[in-house]
Image (cartoon, helix red, strand yellow):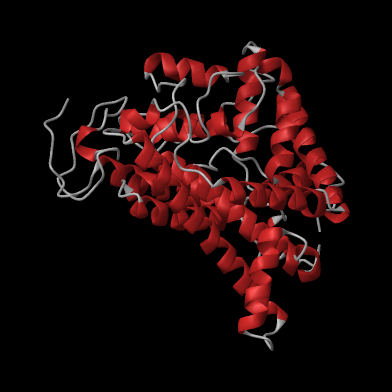
Amino acid sequence: MPEKIFYGRTGLAAYACQADESRGRLVEEPSSPTRTPFQRDRDRIVHSTAFRRMKHKTQVFVYHEGDHYRTRLTHSIEVAQIARALARAFRVDEDLAEALALSHDFGHTPFGHTGEEALNEVMVDFGGFDHNAQSLRIVTDLERRYAAFDGLNLSWETLEGLVKHNGPVTDNLAQSVLNFNKTFDLWLDSHSSIEAQCAAIADDIAYNAHDLDDGLRAELFSLKDISELPLARETLAKVKADYPDLDDSRIIHEVIRRQITAMVEDVIGETNRRLDKLKPQSADDVRHAGHTIVAFSGPMAKKEKIIKAFLFANMYRAPGVMAVRENAYKIVLDLFKNYFSGQAEMPKEWGTDWKQADAKLDEGKRARIVCDFIAGMTDRYAILEHQRLFDVTPDLG
């Protein structure tokens, strides 16, 4: 291990991940004299191809439906802002929380969860598809930028948080996760660090808020509709009392920003109560606490659950959205079948001339290569590829 370097990051809590005590990287590298391991991870994530691709990967709406709807990239930036705010409140490492927030959606396919469902269907005999496992594959293998290693060679703490930000990972593990864990043990059966938990709940806070925002602006539902939600009703009443003549556009913005504030402040209060009770003296104390530390209070958790149920019924399953989902599903299935059968060629860097040189390649390996290629596509590229390969492409407009 390289000699420890003191980075001058004072004031962190005892239960924070300490940069100068990092468990290191799979491929050992010299330490940086100016950046902590977690800063370097964050920087590598921002400069990665996967990060740029999120610009044209859908959140709920297909990328071309409007310039102001969220994409995976803008969502991840919003998550990072909330994650850093929480990390600062708990005096833990903001750079690690930010790195995890910025990379947590790397494994998502084109067309959001629709693409994931389609790939999982065609990969059912080859290990299936899971976007969290795909995120790990991207940062440990599929990014090909560095001379000394494949992937981004991120620190143990960042990889741990990427895999376990939603809690221990013990059931239905993807083979790629199991294989990597044999090489670099990520303690899959424990909880994650405080920093990873900050990123996880920041994800919930961000999409609960901005999916309401996007749904309102897309006119899938109205301010009157969301006034049936306890948290939105409370917030809307305060906004109208403070600004009785405010136009609807600003009311929406005010309601959404106040909802984010209410949720963040609730998490800070509840988490501090849990920290006071646990009194962790190290990051490992958090990992082995047996439960999540960064969480909503009971009342806020109920309100948040109601928001999710509302969005599921009124946005994710809205007739117009479902029509687009069906067409997007077909695009992904068509692409996989054509590439996998060898009817269509993939870019040469994927080694895909299976009609000749790679005809003997194991079916499972072939399927995974095709899956990796499609999973990395942006919405735009998937549509263009389908138009190139087929006479008729389903309308996503």
Return the residue nearer the eye: 299 or 196: 299
What residue is shown at x 80% (from left), y 46% (from top)?
325
Q: Is residue 246 above or below residue 93?
A: below
Return the residue nearer the eye: 134 or 274: 274
Asked whether, in this view, residue 223 is left or right of residue 127, the answer is right
Figure quadrant of the C terminus: bottom right
Determine which quarter of the picture holds residue 62: bottom right
Asked whether, in this view, residue 392 is left or right of residue 163, the answer is right
Residue 112, how many percent across, how many down? 68, 45
Asked whether, in this view, residue 1 is left or right of residue 116, the answer is left
Residue 12, how many percent across, how many down? 24, 47
Residue 275, how many percent across, how many down? 37, 41
Q: Is residue 320 above or below residue 18?
A: below
Residue 145, how many percent across, how many down? 39, 38
Q: Is residue 204 visible?
A: yes
Q: Is residue 208 above or below residue 159?
A: below
Return the residue nearer the eye: 35 or 82: 82
